[in-house]
Amino acid sequence: MKTDFPVRFLRIILNHLTISLLLSISLNSQSDISGIIWEDLNADGIQNVNEPFIDGVPVFLLTCSGQFIQSTLTSNSGNYIFASVPDNNYKIFINKSGLSQHVFTLYDNDNDIDSNGYSSCFLTSTNEYEINAGLTILPYIGDKVWEDLDGNGLQDPDEPGIQNVLVSLFRANDDFLLYQTETDVYGDYKFLNIFPGDYYLKFTADTVFKPTLFVTGSNSYNSDITGTNGPFTTDIFNIETGNNYDQLDAGFFRCISICGLMYLDANFNNVLDPEVVDNKCLKKHCII
């Protein structure tokens, strides 16, 4: 009886070789992962031609599960590269501990690194992959809330700060509440790492306090509460990189009561007679 056993056996061997060959090619496929780290001077997330590169920044290649693969430092031109890496699922981590004043710029323009220093996970497949990072120094907003003892709208040297005043930072274009903080024992407050844009503040103090006068022309010593954007709010102000905004003050004065007695002077002697008091023909009026 004829049989095709040798032929079928040969086919099995050939198929096995083909699968092994394809598996070998797949296992040995490699990619390059590289990128640039630059200083985003205007914090817009876009790498502009005038913005410098940052050298000596540690860059780590990790699997998506967090396993360490390689590390390197950026060159003088801000470049780094992990060459001929076996294809896999990876993510990049940028260690900016040596740049303590810097934060990562806006994500998803030219910057591929989130605020925590990590990129998203990506799958390599015999190709070149570029993961860039932009770092920037952002300004802060702050100054002082004080008690305006003489009610003149200006902060005098002997006037104390007010503790535990709630300070709220709003985005101007949609009135979205971004951050809140409270003043310290000295009346100071601060919002760190604020991206460029238009904002306004709201100061909420204890009900015994009222906003003091708004005095123009004395930005270093006046209160910035105008009520333009609602009670206890400031005007809208614009934030840009390169300058801190540390003169946004709020002054409050404490209400006082002016009290007196009104009575019926029946005998026209211009004296508060005891019988008037006994008859309780008195009314107390307070003016705040």
Image (tube, rainbow, N blue to C red):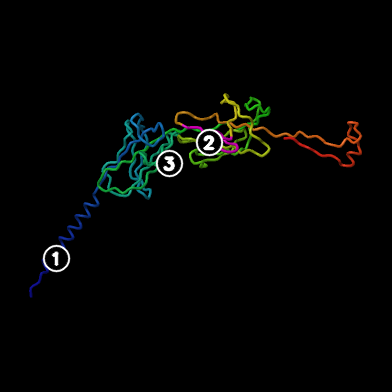
Vertical arrangement, residue 72 with respect to residue 9, above or below: above
Q: Which residue lies at the image location 55% right of the left edge and 29% below the top edge?
A: 247
Q: As rendered, which of 96 and 129 lies closer to the eye?
A: 129
User: How far apart in space, not on screen, are marks 1 and 3 (Cα)?
Assistant: 59 Å
Which mark's residue is nearer the viewer, 1 or 3?
A: 3
What amino acid does circle 2 point to? Tyr
Circle on res. 195: none
Q: Label 3's element? A: loop
Q: Which residue lies at the image location 70% right of the left edge and 34% below the top edge?
A: 255
What amino acid does circle 1 point to? Phe
Quarter holding the C terminus is top right
Task: Name the residue carrying label 2.
Answer: 200
Q: Residues within 10 Å of mark 3 (few under 14, many from 20)?
A: few
Circle on res. 9: 1
Q: Residues within 10 Å of mark 2 (few under 14, many from 20)?
A: many
Q: Position of residue 19 (x, y in %)?
A: 20, 58
Which mark's residue is nearer the viewer, 2 or 1?
A: 2
Q: Which residue lies at the image location 44% right of the left edge and 31% below the top edge?
A: 241
Q: Position of residue 86 (x, y in %)?
A: 27, 47
**Residue 229 part of the magenta-drawn span:** yes
Query: Would you identify the image quadrant in which residue 212 lies?
Result: top right
Q: Label 1's element? A: helix
Mark sitting earlier along the chain (3/2): 3
The kind of secondary structure the magenta stretch mainly shows is loop
Task: Name the residue carrying label 3.
Answer: 115
Q: Position of residue 34 (x, y in %)?
A: 30, 40
Q: Residues within 10 Å of mark 1 (few under 14, many from 20)?
A: few
Which mark's residue is nearer the viewer, 3 or 2?
A: 2
**Residue 138 part of the magenta-drawn span:** no
Residue stretch rendered in magenta on the structure: 227-239
